[in-house]
Image (spheres, rainbow, N blue to C red):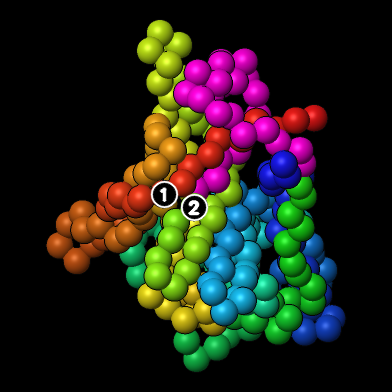
Amino acid sequence: MQTVDFSRSFLTFRTDWTKKPSSTASHKPPYTLNTVRIRLECVCTIEDAQGYREDFALGASCKTEVVGAKRDLWLQPNADFRPIYGRTKFMNLKTYAQVDQSVDFYPPKSEKQSERQVGDIAEAFDDGGVEIVHAKGEVLQSDQEVVEATLANESLVATTRLSTPRYTVTLTYPVKTMNANQRDWVYQTDTGPVLLPDLDLEPDELISGMELAFAAFNHPDWVEFIVREPVPVGEGVGVYHYARPIRWDAHNQVIRLRS
């Protein structure tokens, strides 16, 4: 079988200010050209019975920065930044020290940057897209095989399939943290973040409803997520935290990558 090789799968976007200003920037860059390459952390494939199918790719976390400066590389206030790309649209997640914190755009606009900025890839960037590289994989058939592969430091990928009356969702993600018990042959994933879609939305709205979650399972038939959401920590103050548990009936597989 084939599965995603996350070590070679990337999301990229290029800004070229000689052609058009970036619609996602919050500062004037020192240079007019920059291409960003971000490793993927999850591929979320959504399908329906009418033939709709789309891959949504989650990029790894990075921080807001000034690229190429001689000093003061980190923007203040600083944000955790994660891009999510669909076929034609993107959503940038920016998380500051507290919920609802934001900064101005550059060049200035009438509104501030949203924590969840959704846009068209072709309009926002000079170029951009996702390259998902596949490699040979082997589905591990038993708990013992999963434990043994874990303790042998094999590269592992998980797939989790979710279904509603309208959509089928397949999450594919690298297993970055795994628990393994070779006495009782018990394993448990604890890994993320992954993309968790709002499956009540129409296809063209799905990207705007994506949330981040960590996934855990120790059985092929169900999965539990812990979902990132705003959490109050004081009067009028909230932070984003992985706090809300959800359990889904699912079909899970653990796959060993073959070189």
Please identify the quadrant where the N terminus is shown: top right
Q: Is residue 145 magenta?
A: yes
Is residue 87 visible in this depiction of the protein? yes
Give the x, y percent position of residue 24. 61, 75
User: Quadrant location of residue 125?
Assistant: bottom right
- Are circles 2 and 1 on residues that touch, CB within 8 Å? yes
Say left or right for 215 vs 24: left
Residue drawn where x is 32% and y is 59% of the image = 229
In the picture, residue 132 is in which quadrant? bottom right
Locate residue 60, reporting x and y percent: 60, 50
Numbered range of the magenta stretch: 135-160
Question: Disc 2 marks which residue?
Answer: 161
| 99 drawn magenta | no
How many labels, in total? 2
Compare residues 192 and 166 and report the one nearer the observer: 166
Q: In the rendered image, which residue does mark 1 sit on?
A: 250
Q: Position of residue 233 (x, y in %)?
A: 21, 54
Q: Nearer the viewer, residue 213 or 46?
A: 46
Residue with the most extreme bottom position: 110
Q: Secondary structure at mark 1?
A: loop
The answer to which of marks 2 and 1 sits earlier in the sequence is: 2
